[in-house]
Image: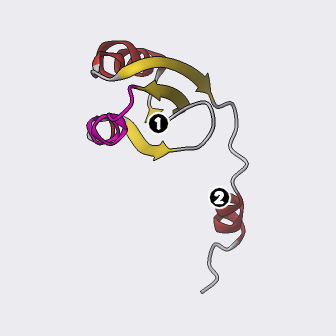
Amino acid sequence: MITAMVMLNIERGKINEVAEKLSDMNGIAEVYSVSGRFDLISIIRVENNDRLADIVTNHMLKVEGILKSETMLAFKCYSRHDLERMFSIGID
């Protein structure tokens, strides 16, 4: 599974509208409004690079209101949630 984070700059007044459109797209797992130099961060989880490219270039970036994007690929997950789940198998 491929996980990517796409940081987005959005036109003023369109953050909620864009976030809702993105969150409805297949392959986009989560959309966060954030502080800092970006307005939204979307988390994409897909089976391969071709699907990632399709979502970003053919779907996401055609959403009206997106001004700029920056995409990062995740190499490895170090989530505390995942570690706790792995070590608590069989414990109630």
Residue 16 is inside the magenta segment: yes
Q: Secondary structure at mark 1?
A: strand
Name the residue at 42% across, 15% down.
Answer: 53
Q: Residues within 10 Å of mark 2 (few under 14, many from 20)?
A: few
Name the residue tied to disc 1.
42
Judged left or right of residue 45, residue 24 is left
Judged left or right of residue 27, residue 35 is right
Q: Secondary structure at mark 2?
A: helix
Q: Residue 15 in the image: x percent, y percent?
A: 37, 37
Name the residue at 42% across, 17% down.
Answer: 67
Residue 66 is inside the magenta segment: no
Name the residue tied to disc 2.
82
Q: Magenta region, mostly helix, strand or loop?
A: helix
Q: Residue 6 in the image: x percent, y percent?
A: 51, 28
Front residue of 61/72: it is 61
Name the residue at 56% across, 21% down.
Answer: 71
Q: Residue furthest front?
A: 12
Give the image quarter of residue 89: bottom right
* Residues drawn in magenta: 11-21
Q: Residues within 10 Å of mark 1 (few under 14, many from 20)?
A: many
